[in-house]
Amino acid sequence: MDDAKHTVYILKCKDGSLYTGYTNNLTKRLQMHREGKGAKYTRGRGPLEVVYVEHFPSKEQAMQREYRIKQLPRKEKDILIRDRMEEGMQGESTKEL
């Protein structure tokens, strides 16, 4: 994973819920989620699966995208994830945390 980018990601929790986040270091952020030091929402909801990753050249663009994704209804998030999976997540692979 290229950690030099501003990244928006979606995690699928073991209960089927989705968590959307922003980071500029995806590997470190995923490690924090794995250790229970990430978002309060994801604590106790593992294992987590990375189901969506999108990179941006600036923090502002990434945070705007994160906000827009968080405003989407679940059905539209599922479509977004499905479409990205079909594209192969642009070189990213899904993985369980």
Image (cartoon, rainbow, N blue to C red):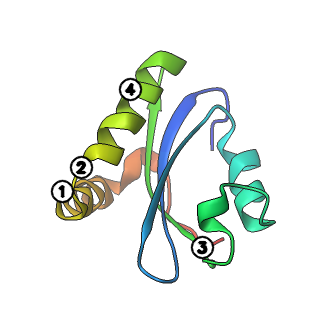
Label 3, secondary structure: give it: loop
Figure check: 8 above or below 51: above
Q: Mark 2 and mark 1: span between their CA atoms?
A: 6 Å
Label 2, secondary structure: give it: loop
Residue at numbered disc 2: 72
Residue at point 35%, 46% (across, down): 70
Numbered mark located on residue 86 in the image: none
Residue kind at label 4, given as amino acid type: Gln
Q: Position of residue 61 (x, y in %)?
A: 41, 20
Residue at point 40%, 45% (across, down): 90
Residue at point 42%, 72% (across, down): 17
Q: Position of residue 21 (x, y in %)?
A: 52, 46
Whether tag 2 and tag 1 are in contact, CB under 8 A, the answer is yes
Image-based side of 63 in relation to 86, left or right: right
Q: Position of residue 47 (x, y in %)?
A: 62, 79
Numbered mark located on residue 96 in the image: 3
Image-based side of 30 in relation to 9, left or right: right
In this rendering, the label closer to the viewer, 2 or 1: 2
Residue kind at label 1, given as amino acid type: Glu
Q: Earlier in the sequence, mark 2 or mark 3?
A: 2
Figure check: 69 above or below 82: above
Q: Mark 2 and mark 4: span between their CA atoms?
A: 13 Å
Residue kind at label 3, given as amino acid type: Glu
Residue at point 35%, 56% (across, down): 88
- How many C-alpha atoms fall within 10 Å of the one at disc 1: few (<14), some, or many (≥20)? few
- How many C-alpha atoms fall within 10 Å of the one at disc 2: few (<14), some, or many (≥20)? few
Quadrant assignment for the N terminus = top right
Q: Earlier in the sequence, mark 3 or mark 1?
A: 1
